[in-house]
Image (cartoon, helix red, strand yellow):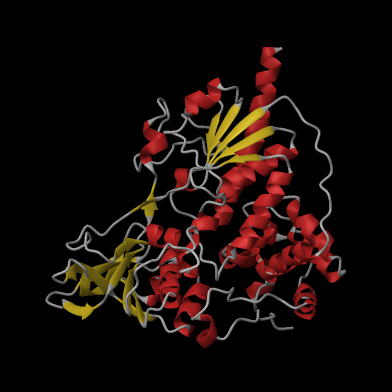
């Protein structure tokens, strides 16, 4: 049986709205797709999952039409199933190891996870069984996927857990980074609400490092601390013209649109100035998100400017395909050299140089080399820079004794995620640099296990 294709909005329609692009499986499709699973005795797919979901187990529940049981099976390991079913790169993780993929197409594990989570959301809510409390307090810094996962796992172990979030809404990159048409915000809210019902307290608008320090949290009685602040400091091109009006970092642009709901202007008074022609620099998922968002905000022409070829684009194939269907123009093997302004100090054009690929660099991708005398310009009204981001220094520079690596990220023990400070753990992008949602969640789970053990030993030592 062929792999079931998820229905999507028509590209001409969806490029003008912020509704979710992928519509999800029908029950008939989900049952057909679940029937493809071989229920392997040694499921390699589980090995490919950073949070080790019992994948054959939840798919079997779907086969049996026990959709709520499938969701419960997923939640044994994953507190954010509706999120992961939508944004995880399953093709490089669980599905990559599926036996069916050796000779054909792997089981659509992500689509089935989304189906189960959405079925649970549509059903009458069930009360969460009481959790036996223990005398341990944990502070979680950052309400993104790493922090939320760590908090949920600790709460289920009976910890008194408080999350400190710098922004006014929890969710981290799920809330401010990933656009509404890929991850509706009511789904993020629903997943966060579940974690709150486990007993987790979330304090928003608290910037740890400024409002309160890590040391002060320890002094307030928290037995252990997890740092999951992500990597939110955008990188720039360092080319002339980046200070012109109409130039955004993708981080700022997507935050304005998502967290401040600029896509609902004038209902929400957070306009984003977007002209008719937008150039997005970069080739990852964030670049695709920024480009597709620009189109929905009214841009007539949107360009992805990337210095390598299509084969090297780091974005998910699904996101590249969606962007192309919606009319995004790809300027590949082009590298920006200058942003040109008009007399009003606004963006007027982008200058690029054409590139060719040489030998592979340290990342394994072929190194782009400028072609001499190939510079050219084309008119644009906005430039959005989506070339990655690094660690925000506010917490790092206010936490004495916290050891960093040569790239400025927190250094941890790879086995335990323990930092150089006793009882303080870290995980997610603040340790690894920008990675996937599910990788951050895996770090949150790993840290939670160690924090449980640390608190047990601490209480034993204290008598």
Q: Is residue 274 above or below residue 10?
A: above
Q: Residue furthest top?
A: 463
Percent x, y for residue 113? 71, 65
* Quarter occupied by residue 83: bottom right
Establish if 257 lies above or below 393.
below
Q: Confirm whether residue 405 shows in the render.
A: no
* Residue drawn where x is 64% and y is 41% of the image: 151
Give coordinates of residue 363: x percent, y percent: 37, 58
Image location of residue 272, percent across then percent down: 38, 66
Quarter of the image with the N terminus in it = bottom right
352 on left or right of 437: left
Residue 316: give x, y in percent of width and height.
50, 69
Q: Residue at x 51, y 55 (%)?
A: 173
Quadrant in which the C terminus is drawn: top right
Residue 457 in view here: yes
Left or right, 250 with reference to 119: left
Q: Residue at x 42, y 77 (%)?
A: 295
Q: Give whichever of 103, 165 is nearer the camera.
A: 165
Q: Is residue 106 above or below residue 217?
A: below
Quadrant of residue 42 within the rendered picture: bottom right
> Which one is in front, 169 or 61?
169
Q: How many marks?
A: 0
In the picture, measured across the screen, residue 313 lies left or right of residue 351, that is right
- Given residues 62 and 194, the one toward you in this image is 194
Snapshot quadrant of residue 222: top right
Q: Is residue 239 above or below residue 99?
A: above
């Amino acid at each position: 049986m062929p792999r079931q294709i998820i229905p999507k909005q028509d590209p001409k329609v969806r490029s003008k709205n912020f509704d979710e692009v992928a519509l999800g499986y029908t029950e008939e499709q989900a049952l057909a797709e679940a029937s493809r699973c071989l229920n392997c005795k040694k499921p390699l797919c589980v090995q490919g999952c950073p949070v080790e979901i019992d994948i054959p187990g939840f798919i079997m529940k779907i086969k049996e039409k026990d959709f709520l049981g499938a969701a419960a099976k997923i939640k044994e390991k994953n507190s954010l199933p509706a999120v992961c079913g939508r944004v995880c790169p399953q093709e490089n993780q669980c599905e990559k190891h599926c036996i069916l993929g050796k000779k054909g197409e792997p089981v659509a594990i992500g689509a089935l996870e989304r189906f189960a989570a959405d079925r649970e959301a549509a059903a009458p809510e069930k009360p969460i069984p009481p959790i036996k409390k223990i005398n341990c307090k944990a502070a979680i810094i950052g309400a993104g996927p790493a922090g939320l996962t760590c908090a949920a796992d600790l709460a289920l172990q009976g910890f008194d857990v408080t999350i400190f979030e710098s922004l006014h809404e929890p969710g981290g990159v799920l809330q401010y980074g990933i656009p509404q048409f890929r991850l509706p915000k009511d789904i993020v809210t629903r997943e966060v609400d579940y974690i709150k019902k486990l007993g987790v307290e979330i304090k928003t608008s608290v910037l740890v490092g400024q409002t309160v320090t890590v040391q002060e949290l320890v002094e307030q009685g928290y037995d252990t601390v997890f740092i999951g602040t992500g990597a939110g400091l955008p990188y720039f091109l360092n080319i002339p013209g980046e200070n012109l009006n109409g130039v955004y970092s993708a981080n700022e642009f997507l935050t304005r649109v998502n967290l401040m709901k600029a896509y609902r202007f004038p209902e929400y008074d957070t306009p984003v100035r977007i002209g008719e022609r937008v150039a997005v620099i970069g080739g990852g998922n964030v670049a695709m998100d920024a480009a597709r968002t620009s189109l929905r905000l009214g841009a007539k022409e949107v360009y992805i400017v990337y210095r390598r070829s299509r084969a090297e684009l780091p974005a998910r194939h699904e996101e590249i395909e969606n962007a192309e269907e919606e009319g995004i123009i790809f300027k590949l093997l082009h590298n920006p050299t200058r942003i040109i302004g008009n007399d009003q100090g606004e963006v007027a054009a982008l200058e690029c140089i054409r590139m060719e690929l040489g030998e592979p660099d340290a990342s394994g991708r072929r190194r782009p080399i400028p072609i001499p005398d190939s510079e050219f310009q084309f008119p644009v009204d906005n430039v959005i820079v989506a070339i990655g981001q690094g660690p925000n220094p506010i917490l790092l520079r206010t936490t004495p004794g916290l050891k960093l690596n040569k790239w400025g990220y927190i250094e941890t023990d790879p086995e335990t995620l323990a930092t150089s400070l006793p009882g303080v753990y870290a995980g997610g992008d603040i340790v690894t640099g920008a990675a996937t949602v599910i990788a951050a969640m895996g770090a949150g789970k790993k840290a939670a296990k160690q924090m449980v053990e640390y608190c047990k030993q601490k209480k034993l030592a204290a008598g």
